[in-house]
């Protein structure tokens, strides 16, 4: 008796329920059929037979505790103990078919029918392997993605949560599955339980099938952070699901804000620079035109700053400039603008001016603030300022002309003895009464 026959006579350790099946032929087709039946709870493979002792199907059967035979007749005799056993003859040998008829009294499945079944089994196996490979590939991408991935349905219930999302939000996947997206992004779940924001986020996806929006997201710790959510959709078993790619953009926004700050603000005083001042002046002019209003531009140059800077050094000079910036900003309204446009030069926009006296009062307030003593490097110092004033639309219409007129008026103030202010010379008399 061969080793295979010895194994055939040992108790079967495989599945002990389901439709009994005997496979004759342990080559490629028989092996594929055995592999498929191993995963089928409705089938009990009672044995597999092949004259070749090294046939791959016999090896696979032995590995799973299924009887393996090198003698077809012995396999058929063993099958007699199972009621309604189905025999799959994949050998294409008519003599084997006759054995099946003689011993079991059934024709079995052979010839073209067996070939068709083998082909079906092979195709099913291939589809199964492709599906498994696709699932494994998706899981590998899902698990290893650097960005957080959250899958949710049309009701906003979370049904997928990858490791990167766990890192971003601080939740384990098991803690969020089945819960609302509002847990992670509060705006996606309103207080009254409606899903209006969720619908806005998921409806009307663009031509590429995605939509990108920024939200305030919430970590498990309660911390809120800036996030970017890219949403796409897919259909799974007739269900519409959404894939949300989540990125923590806190650092990106911080860098962007820093770049914007450097591009539009003075690095030392943090006041608007010349670029931002120009933009605000153009906006102020446009608003005044629409409302038939007036604005004033003040050009301020410090008196005595160079002497302090030369005597105490640049660091002390920088401290002085920062204090000047603070005092001037305090002397005007929040709706007005003060900017540093040069070394010791500042400009001011006063919006919604009703009377020239209003401008004079602000100029005097600024001069008084600047004239207060400064304590720099442990020493008390005093400086002054000269201010030139131009009015829109009386003195100029364009922003650059307004600045030029205010600059010229500032030099007139210096020539008048410094630490004072001057309107544009054509309006010197008008400065005494309402405009």
Image (cartoon, helix red, strand yellow):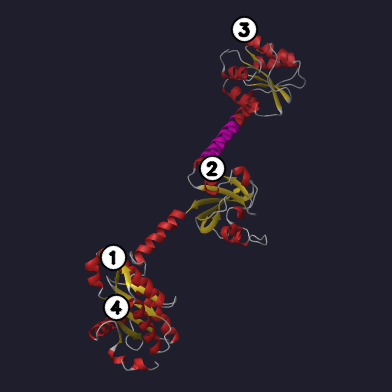
Within 10 angstroms of label 1, few (less than 14), some, or many (20 or more) residues?
some
Rounded to the nearest angstrom, the CA distance separating label 3 from label 2 is 53 Å
Q: Is residue 378 shown in magenta?
A: no
* Residue 316 marker: 1
Q: Is residue 339 left or right of residue 179?
A: left
One can see residue 91 in this view = no
The quadrant in which the C terminus is found is: bottom left
Front in this rendered view, residue 98 or 58: 58
Q: Is residue 130 shown in magenta?
A: yes
Front in this rendered view, residue 49 or 115: 49
Rounded to the nearest angstrom, the CA distance separating label 3 from label 4 is 114 Å
The residue lying at 62 percent from left, 21 percent from top is 90
Q: For mark 4, give the secondary structure.
A: strand
Image quarter of residue 306: bottom left
Query: Residue 54 placed where, x, y %?
Result: 56, 14
Q: Is residue 184 left or right of residue 9?
A: left
Q: Which residue is mark 3?
A: 2
Q: Are marks 4 and 1 in contact (CB under 8 Å)?
A: no
* Residue 384 marker: 4
Rounded to the nearest angstrom, the CA distance separating label 2 from label 4 is 62 Å
Point out the stretch of residues depicted in magenta.
Answer: 122-140
Residue that lies at the very extreme toward the top in this rendered image:
1
């Amino acid at each position: 008796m061969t080793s295979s026959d010895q194994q055939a006579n040992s108790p079967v350790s495989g599945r002990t329920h389901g439709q009994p099946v005997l496979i004759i032929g342990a080559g490629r087709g028989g092996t594929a059929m055995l592999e498929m039946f191993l995963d089928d709870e409705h089938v009990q493979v009672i044995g597999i037979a092949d004259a070749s002792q090294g046939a791959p199907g016999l090896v696979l059967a032995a590995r799973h505790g299924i009887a393996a035979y090198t003698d077809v007749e012995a396999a058929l005799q063993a099958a007699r103990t199972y009621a309604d056993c189905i025999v799959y003859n994949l050998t294409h040998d008519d003599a084997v078919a006759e054995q099946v008829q003689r011993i079991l009294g059934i024709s079995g499945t052979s010839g073209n029918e067996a070939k068709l079944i083998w082909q079906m089994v092979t195709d099913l196996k291939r589809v199964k392997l492709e599906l498994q490979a696709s699932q494994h590939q998706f899981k590998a991408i899902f698990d290893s993605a650097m960005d957080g991935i959250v899958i949710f349905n049309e009701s906003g219930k979370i049904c997928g949560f990858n490791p990167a999302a766990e890192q971003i939000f601080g939740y384990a996947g098991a803690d969020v599955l089945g819960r609302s997206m509002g847990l992670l992004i509060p705006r996606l779940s309103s207080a009254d339980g409606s899903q209006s924001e969720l619908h806005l986020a998921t409806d009307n996806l663009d031509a590429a099938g995605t939509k990108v929006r920024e939200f305030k997201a919430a970590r498990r710790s309660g911390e809120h952070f800036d996030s970017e959510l890219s949403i796409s959709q897919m259909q799974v078993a007739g269900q519409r699901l959404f894939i949300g790619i989540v990125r923590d953009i806190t650092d990106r926004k911080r860098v962007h804000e820093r770049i914007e700050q450097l591009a539009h603000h003075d690095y030392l005083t943090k006041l608007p620079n010349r670029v931002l001042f120009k933009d605000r002046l153009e906006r102020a002019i446009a608003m005044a035109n629409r409302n038939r209003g007036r604005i004033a531009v003040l050009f301020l140059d410090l008196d005595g700053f160079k002497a302090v800077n030369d005597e105490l050094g640049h660091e002390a000079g920088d401290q002085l400039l920062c204090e000047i910036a603070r005092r001037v900003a305090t002397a005007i309204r929040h709706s007005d603008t003060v900017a540093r446009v040069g070394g010791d030069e500042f400009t001011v926009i006063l919006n919604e001016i009703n009377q020239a006296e209003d401008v004079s009062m602000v100029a005097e307030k600024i001069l008084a603030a600047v004239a207060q003593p400064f304590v720099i490097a442990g020493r008390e110092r005093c400086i002054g300022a000269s201010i030139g004033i131009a009015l829109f639309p009386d003195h100029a219409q364009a922003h650059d002309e307004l600045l030029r007129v205010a600059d010229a008026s500032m030099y007139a103030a210096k020539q008048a003895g410094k630490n004072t202010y001057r309107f544009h010379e054509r309006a010197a008399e008008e400065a005494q009464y309402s405009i």
